[in-house]
Amino acid sequence: MISLAYARNEERLSEKEYERLCRSLPPEMRDDLRRYRRWQDRQAGLLGKLLMNYTVREVMGEPPDQSTLVTDAYRRPFLAGRPDLDFNISHTAGLVVCAAAAGMGRLGVDVERVGEIQLAEFRRVFTEEEYALLSGLPDATATFFRLWTRKEAVMKADGRGFSLDPAGIDCLPDRIGVDGNCYAVRELDLGAGYAAHLAASDVDEVVVGEVRFPRHPRPRPE
Amino acid sequence: MQTAKAKIEAIYPLQHLQRALLFHHLSAPNADQGLIQTRFRLAGPLNPEAFAAAWRATLDRHQALRASVHWEKVSKPVWVVHPAVEGSINHLDWSGLPESRQRQHMTDYLAEDRRRGMDLTQTPTSRLLLARLGPEAHFCCWTSHHLLLDGWSSGVILRDFLAHYEAATGGTTARLPPIPDHKPYFRHLQSRDEGLREQYWRERLSLLDKPSLLPAAEGQQRSLSRSLDPDFQQGFVAYCKRQQVTQNAVLQGLWAMLLGRYLQTGHVCFGISVNGRPPEVADMDQVAGMFARILPKVVDLNQANFFQRIQEESARDTAEQYVGLDEIAEWSGTDGLPFNSLLAVQNYPWTELSGGGLRVTEFAGDLTSLYPVTCMVLPREAWEVTIRYREGIAEALPQWLLEGYLSLISWVARQTDQSLPPVGELPPPPTDPTVPAPDDVVRPPYAAPTNGTQLRLAGLWEQLLPVDTVGIDDNFFHCGGTSLAALRLFARLERATGKNISPASLLLHPTIRQLARFLDDGEAASEWNNLVPQRVSGNLPPLFCFHGGLGYVLMYQSLTHHLHPQRPVYALQPNGIDGRSELDGSIEEMAAHYLAEIDKVGAPDPLILLGYCYSGVICVAIGRLLVEAGRPAPIIIGADIDPPGVLDQKGKWKWRQPGSLRWYWGHLRLGRWTDVGEQLAMELLTEQLLSENLRLRLRARRLKDGLVAAFRRYRAPEYGHPICLLRSQELRQWSSHSFVIESWRRISGDQLTIQDVPAGHAEIFQEPAVAETARLIEAYIANHSGTVATPPGLVSSNSTP
């Protein structure tokens, strides 16, 4: 079973709320967040970590020890000492998403806010066939984002991310192969204006939930 | 026979500020900001035995000198007074050395002493260096910790020490009046009504509609200082007298005005350091210890009787001064302290310290401040104003504060009545990209691109990232960079350079500096010396602005804001401004040099050049180089530009090569002692021997002299292409006016356009006139480049002299 949770990141949390939520993070992580120049990114970083707590707890029954979070040679984060467990976080303007699962290898998730693109700028990331498909469309935007989030989810599930050549991964078929590994992909509906995909060895059982922050909003004085 | 003495004389709790200092002491033992090095020289014959005896007696007299600090295995951190302490005096002899070596030894000692830090758990918690410089000259450094002793204490201790020394040289013991220990002080603290205190401070703090926060940043402390012209001191004192307030009140009021201008608010708050000794407890001002406190100073900028009110409020503040900053933070209701800057006016009542034939000279102490910005005023013979700031803060801010504060002080000093300074006329505060957003973002200090690759990347980043400005040390992902933005970045980079690079390289090289190095294959790309980018992005042809006669290009910052938002702007500063490279010897060399730098940017012809007073001739020299190379003549715009030969037109003043005999003679006759002294220092001393302040001043002078010399040597040949002169109101008044116009008309081959700027010479690039200057520049460019569309609303207006 894969647990997947997402949170909206459209409004800025109050400073108090932000500080309160930050308290569950190790101090180094809090310091890292302060390096983000825009509140949107800082808050996305915080929400990503909180969603990771949430999904890991869903899977394991207990939250992870955030202080064991490390990154591998491809800068992919993982929890040291928990080789059976994998999680993956993605964020885009206004939305943060995290997926976690145990005992099924690595998984990848990618979400993008659909916006204007110039297809030519992405010539290098698609196979010939993919690019032909996209450039033949009267409006390629929606398809571009669906295809791209498929691709990035698979690259993240593989673990090597951008160290892979995206143009070498054919994302048109149902199941997508990368160097002999085969990934199933599932499209996620996270609301209008977003494209999102989840990739893993098996995506049949996915529990999707929205988490709202602050968890228990206090009533505001009129 | 000696009776067994008690091991401990007293135990006292640490107060709020002491606890803050303890925290810093523990977190940064080798860069302990609480360590204070009080330095002075002793003139006169010194008796070593009497010196040691006097030091022992001084230690005996003051509890704080016999104290250690303990925080482990106690419920609250405390300081403990020991009945007796062995003072340690470190004797060194530097008397055989030349003065330069002695100075080097002092510098080395101070640095090493600071690195050594201080173990506060072991007595003695201070140490004394006595270095012999000559038969009747000694250098002393007394190292102590702010946790136990405040600034006031150093005066108390030195005075007591000299009294003991005087007695000891006469073979007697000094009979100093007894002083209280710390108990009555703590009793006094407890006797205060806490409810009243809270009510008072809550009321004061409620005046603030927002906290008065300057940009905060991390990093080492840096400082900028300047002395006030001695002529102003008398005027300042007279102004205070007319206002019937203390100098302190006026200094506080002016600082408040400056902060208000920066923060755009009517009520401001800043920290002030106060002596902290309760006047109600007799003789407390004779006691050494850590009583100093930081109090919030809340000022209403619109109140009537401005300075008098500040003084009255200070009296109330002092009455309720026993308040912890933790309490202030809580009562302010702003989630933290409502201020983060500190004003420290150091006026100790001791002007002359001497005793037993010894006289203290060159007394200098340290000020400990844990605040991002601290303004220190030393109102002694030559007033010195210093702004201390964390290195993460862009220099433009402390510079603005320093200059603004000095100009307010000099303004009141020039008045003959009680009027308040026109704060609105200060130059606008810097809106520098390096200043982080108010919500405590940790950002590397802003660094501008230094080569073509970095510049190209900076331009792309600014297009792709949702932030305004990026420095070359900013991390792509911290600026809102996403994977899609990374893909776009490399697609655009490939289009521009033909290089195909994996977006994964951004993970390993997430800053412009790192990525540029990676792209350049680790080869050092040639760095610019002269080009200072003001704005790198935009689709209009860039404007290149040249330094004035002092070498600086800072004035072009506000111009950039008013030009078309799509117009990139680069300023050019001379070699030599960094003190490392040599200044180009002639205008022709400068022109060739600058043109080579400009061509690295890859701007389309015709180039657009802007000069200011001095640099008109540089623009013309570049124009000649371009025409000779078969390129189109540049668009040249000059604000009050000086034609060659103008120096001979300016009054009776005769120019002499600085350092020549005739120069010395002329300056001595005019009584310009400072200039003469600096010139001598410049010729005789090496830079290492000079103080930071003097070094910078001399560097600036050397640069200016070099520029003026190059200007004088320049003989302008005919140029014969259009020039636009932006003329200030002042230029029209100058006696050289018709010479200036005629010269440029001749040089341009009768293709001179004159545009009048409604401002004085110095204000052309300052608010508010700069808006009009920018408009005139854009209009002239639009009319003369042909291909560029006129931005809406811009009409050119020509006028003739």
Image (cartoon, rainbow, N blue to C red):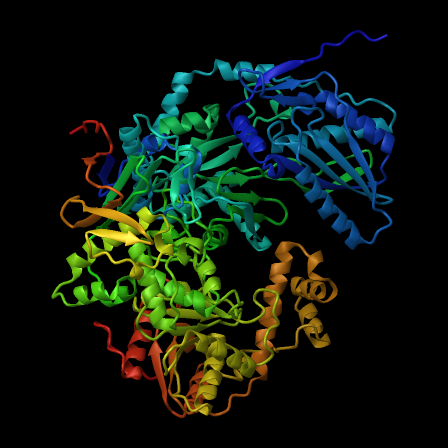
The image quadrant of residue B157 is: top right
For the point 24% across and 77% down, the residue is: B789
Determine whether, in the image, residue B318 is placed left or right of residue B9.
left
For the point 27% across and 66% down, the residue is: A123
The N terminus of chain B - image quarter: top right
Where residue B685 sits: x, y (%)?
A: 73, 62
Q: Nearer the viewer, residue B723 or B345?
A: B723
Whether residue A118 appears in this view of the structure is no
The C terminus of chain B - image quarter: bottom left
For the point 31% across and 28% down, the residue is: A60
View extreme (front): residue:
A180
Determine whether, in the image, residue B721 is placed left or right of residue B115.
left
The image quadrant of residue B577 is: bottom right
Q: Is residue B313 above or below residue A139?
A: above
Whether residue B750 appears in this view of the structure is yes
Where residue B374 sits: x, y (%)?
A: 51, 43
Determine whether, in the image, residue B279 is placed left or right of residue B678.
left
The image quadrant of residue A139 is: bottom left
- Count the numbered circles shown: 0
Q: Nearer the viewer, residue B530 or B556?
A: B530
Where residue B637 sits: x, y (%)?
A: 39, 79
Q: Is residue B690 above or below residue B152?
A: below
